[in-house]
Amino acid sequence: MTPLLQLRDIHAAYDEIEVLHGIDLTIAPGEVVAALGPNGAGKTTLMRVISGELEPTRGDLLVGGRRMNGAAASDLARAGLCTIPEGRGVFPNLTVRENLWMMTHRGMSRSAIEEAAYSYFPRLEDRRTQTAGTMSGGEQQMLAVARAVSTRPSLLLLDELSMGLAPLVVNELLTAVGKLADTGVAILIVEQFAEAVLKFADHAVIISHGRVTASGTSALIREELRNAYLGTA
Ligand code: ATP
């Protein structure tokens, strides 16, 4: 099976200063991968490389088997990539339904988009006429994920999905993400060290100082993190 995302020896820099020093990462269809690491490790830079905002200085970015180094964000979107940035990207002055309706340019009807969104997040149906900006942070994040679903992505990037949210809400979001993966979507979740994400991810990598310092099943990475916290690693 062709991986939906493959990074081979990715290097990236701001001006002359290199901050990613050779990242390798592969995500298959239907797989959820977590990229974890402390502040300043290079996670956001990695997301920017994958979403076409920052061209790698070395290495290969492959989406669906095609080399996409330097491709425009619009070409990456056409290849099936959808990014939910940190800070969510919903329109606060529009209602839930209006936020969803904006996605009809992708070819789905308003009612089909709403139906898909509410099947993942029933709570959004109750809120459909509410202005997005007046909802809780968790509900806004649900709306952002629901909007992404309507683009029928093959590869979804989630940046700091759980930031500032209560554990129960994070679980609800991750459950929906898992359902999405079950339909064959490949998902990369970038987070600081978030135990909750490991419960839902198949595979995880730890990024530190611009390098992958550990890679394995979520169970293995959880163990490594515990040992590191306990100072026994
Ligand atoms: P955080 O969780 O704080 O967002 P991160 O793991 O996402 O951290 P990055 O934001 O990718 O890390 O930062 C990696 C390194 O690149 C850091 O040393 C940071 O200071 C530097 N950096 C990030 N953005 C820029 C920029 N626009 N110009 C110059 N250096 C930058």
Image (cartoon, helix red, strand yellow):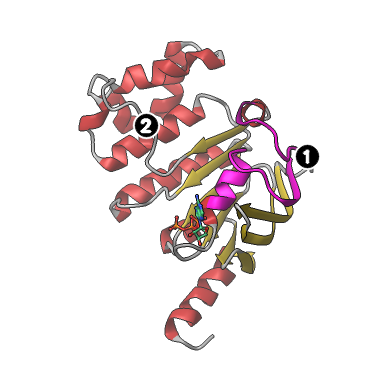
Residue that label 2 marks: 143
Horizontal side of 168 relative to 109 (left or right) equals left
Q: Is residue 120 visible?
A: no
Q: Nearer the viewer, residue 122 or 3?
A: 3
Marker disc for residue 157: none
Mark 1 or mark 2, which is nearer the start of the sequence?
1
Marker disc for residue 67: 1
Label 1 crowd (10 A; few <14 / some 14-19 / many >=20): few
Q: Residue at x 44, y 27 (%)?
A: 147
The extreme left residue here reads: 134
Task: Give coordinates of residue 156: x percent, y percent.
Answer: 56, 39
Q: Nearer the viewer, residue 192 or 146?
A: 192
Q: Amino acid at mark 2?
A: Leu
Q: Which residues are magenta?
A: 45-74
Q: Residue at x 46, y 66 (%)?
A: 38
| Residue 190, placed above or below residue 40 | above
Check the picture and name the quadrant holding the N terminus: top right
Q: Is residue 86 visible?
A: yes
